[in-house]
Amino acid sequence: MWQRKKINLAENSMDTLFRNVFIAGFILVGGAIILHSVLFPAVRQCSLSVRAVIRKFVFLFSMVLLEQKLGPIGRLRKLAWLVAAVCFLVLFVTGFGPRILCGVPLSGWLLMIHATFAPVFAVCVAFLAATWAWQCCFSVRDWDWVVRLFTFKWKGLLVDSDLGWKLSFWAMILLVLPVSLSIVSSMFPIFGTHGQEVLFQLHRFTALALSLVALAHLYLVLRGRCKAEQN
Ligand code: HEM
């Protein structure tokens, strides 16, 4: 009886901690993105005319279309990116939704949807990692950025660098490993009850880290595209 009460108490405090870390994480990363975009705007003149807003929507929409100039691998890569993005959204909503919005664990139909989209997501990410890796290799320019950081030459340091989206890409690829391996290994009776609980916590906390890094990555990539379109 006492043992059961102690376990329930520990579970409740972990859930509260998870909820608080979720809210704090999104406020922190969202706040940093807003601050960065205000301090270092990607577009020189921000026009709010109807034409400019429609142009931006068309530009964002064009990012999900398959361009004519893409070869077979390029098309496959774009498709994999789109499928991974849709799966990620579904995993995000079904994973965090019940716990954060309603305070209940993931179960029933939502759990089935979550577990169905998960393998598709993992396969697409593996394909993207293999085909996109060479574009995300670090270059001499990235190394210069690190040198400037440590030699205190900070002027313009936060404005133009490819290091951000490259680092966030690799962080996402690395984080997908504990996100998937933790929950898959908890499905086998190898680690005992306590081990399974630890793996479950590892799954949801690394999933949260993955979501925050993905948000930062999306911001940096969109920013880079906006700049490229302007030049
Ligand atoms: C990639 C492979 C993935 C697999 C195989 C998977 C599978 C699962 C399973 C089976 C559960 C239920 C665990 C339990 O109740 O004991 C779960 C929970 C959860 N998943 Fe995933 N998932 C994956 C990816 C993701 C991703 C990408 C996210 C978020 C972006 C995510 C977020 C969550 C969260 C937050 C929970 C905990 C829900 C709760 O608090 O009750 N998962 N996952």
Image: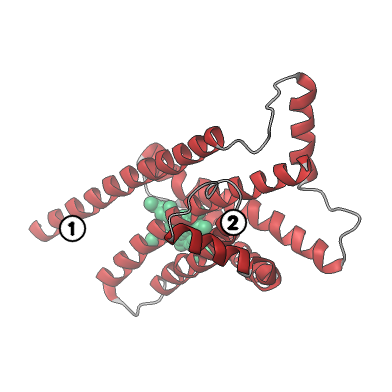
For the residue pair 171 and 122, the one nearer the viewer reads as: 171
Look at the image and tell me whether residue 32 can be seen: yes
Where residue 214 sits: x, y (%)? Answer: 54, 53
Badge 1 density bin: few <14, some 14–19, many ≥20, Cα 10 Å: few
Where residue 188 sits: x, y (%)? Answer: 40, 76
Residue 84 shown left or right of residue 11 in the figure: right
Residue at mark 1 to residue at mark 2: CA–CA distance? 41 Å
Q: Which corner quadrant of the image does residue 135 belong to? A: bottom right
Residue occupying image coordinates x 57% and y 52%: 217
Where residue 7 sits: x, y (%)? Answer: 18, 58
Label 1: which residue?
A: 7
| Residue 157 vertical position relative to residue 132 in the rendered view, above or below | above
Q: Three-letter amino acid code at disc 2? A: Trp
Residue 203 shown left or right of residue 117 in the figure: left
Residue occupying image coordinates x 42% and y 71%: 187
For the residue pair 197 and 4, the one nearer the viewer reads as: 197
Badge 2 density bin: few <14, some 14–19, many ≥20, Cα 10 Å: many
* Quarter of the figure that contains the C terminus: top right
Residue occupying image coordinates x 90% and y 58%: 69
View extreme (bottom): residue: 190
Where residue 80 sits: x, y (%)? Answer: 72, 61
Question: Does label 1 or label 2 sit earlier along the sequence?
Answer: 1
Q: Three-letter amino acid code at disc 1? A: Ile
Ligand 1 within 8 Å, label 1 CB: no
Label 2: which residue?
A: 165
Tag 2's secondary structure? helix
